[in-house]
Image (tube, helix red, strand yellow):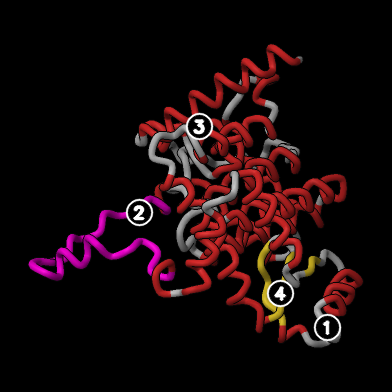
Amino acid sequence: MSDFILDPTIDFIPDPIWLIDMLWNDLKQLDQMDRPPEEDVQLYEWTLALIGRKFPDAAWYALEAFQNILSARMKEEKTSGPRRRPEELTEGMLSTLAAVSQLLQNEEDRQRIARLTELVRKWPEQYTPKAAEPSPVSGQNAQAAQEAPEHPEATDDPETQHRLQKAASETYREMKQRQQEEINAFPMAFAFSKTQLAEGMQKLGLQPTDTDQIVSIGGGGFVRKTDVEAFHRMFRLHRLERKSAMDADRTGDGFLLEMFRCELADHEYGYTRDAEPALDALGMTFEELAQDDRLMHAFHKACRQEAEWYDTHC
């Protein structure tokens, strides 16, 4: 990609809503990675907040992006990493970020925009995982490594075993609804103003001055420090439950089929014939489907069934 330089003589008016969309798309992919760089995530989030303050007409749109970020983060569906964006989109983002930077008076804000610009310019090379060096393992150690469970807590924790057994009898929609109810019941709060912060602190049983007792979960959300481990554990269990149910479907005609049909229906596939929103909701890509015969079988069958249902009933 050629270096992009904004011509200072050109009067470029940034489109904040378009930029919010582009930043949200980057952040959604970055946030789905395993152990994304926290500084980079915070830089994207900070820029969304800055745009909301700098462009009042886009403030609500920025808030909506934060809410979408939180929703995706709660699902914690990991992907293989960010997907490459078209070069013209990258250049558009660079020019828009440069225009935003020119409107800023605060030097610290301008420096942050400059750092984000470098991330945008290099997307996604800086997040491409490097191949790990193979470790020398032999004999009994090699056999133990191969047999080691992907989720050790599944065998070590009786509570997890109980949850997996219970989840095995659920349909995908039942599991999704139960997990959402658990999320809704978890003690957390959201704030985008001082008033909302005070209300959120009170909701968590804290005083407005007890800000040292809370931890941000991004997107304006926060939890008590004492609840952080329980918060992360809840989402680890949710991931494990779904993965266990997916792995148990050996043919793709059970849980996997219902999973795809549920998300396709929720994202109006019958009308649009566009499956990508459903895959995004599941944290999957077409490339990942192509690598698993069960997933591909279930996906194509679900698409066919949803299309037939829509054509018959609508």
Dot in front, 3 or 2: 2
Marks 2 and 3: in contact by CB < 8 Å?
no
- Please name the residue shown 62% across and 22% down the image: 306
* Mark closer to the chain start, 3 or 2: 3
Q: What mark, if any, has residue 129 been given in the picture?
A: 2
User: In this orientation, which residue lies closer to the viewer: 71 or 133?
Assistant: 71
Describe residue 136's horizontal placement relative to residue 2 as left or right. left
| SS type, badge 4 | strand
Bounds of the magenta span? 127-153
User: In this orientation, which residue lies closer to the viewer: 137 or 35?
Assistant: 137
Marks 2 and 4: in contact by CB < 8 Å?
no
Q: What mark, if any, has residue 86 been given in the picture?
A: 3
Kindly identify the amino acid type of the residue bearing the numbered disc 3. Pro
Residue 141 spot, x, y in % from top left: 15, 70
* Mark closer to the chain start, 4 or 2: 2
Instruction: Judge whether 224 appears above or below 164 on screen.
Output: below
* Mark closer to the chain start, 3 or 4: 3
| SS type, badge 2 | loop
Residue 267 spot, x, y in % from top left: 68, 32
Q: What mark, if any, has residue 223 been given in the picture?
A: 4
* Mark closer to the chain start, 2 or 1: 2
* Mark closer to the chain start, 4 or 1: 1
| SS type, badge 3 | loop
Using the numbered discs, state the Cα–Cα distance from disc 1 to disc 3 in whole angstroms: 48 Å
Dot in front, 2 or 1: 1
Q: Quadrant of the C terminus?
A: top right
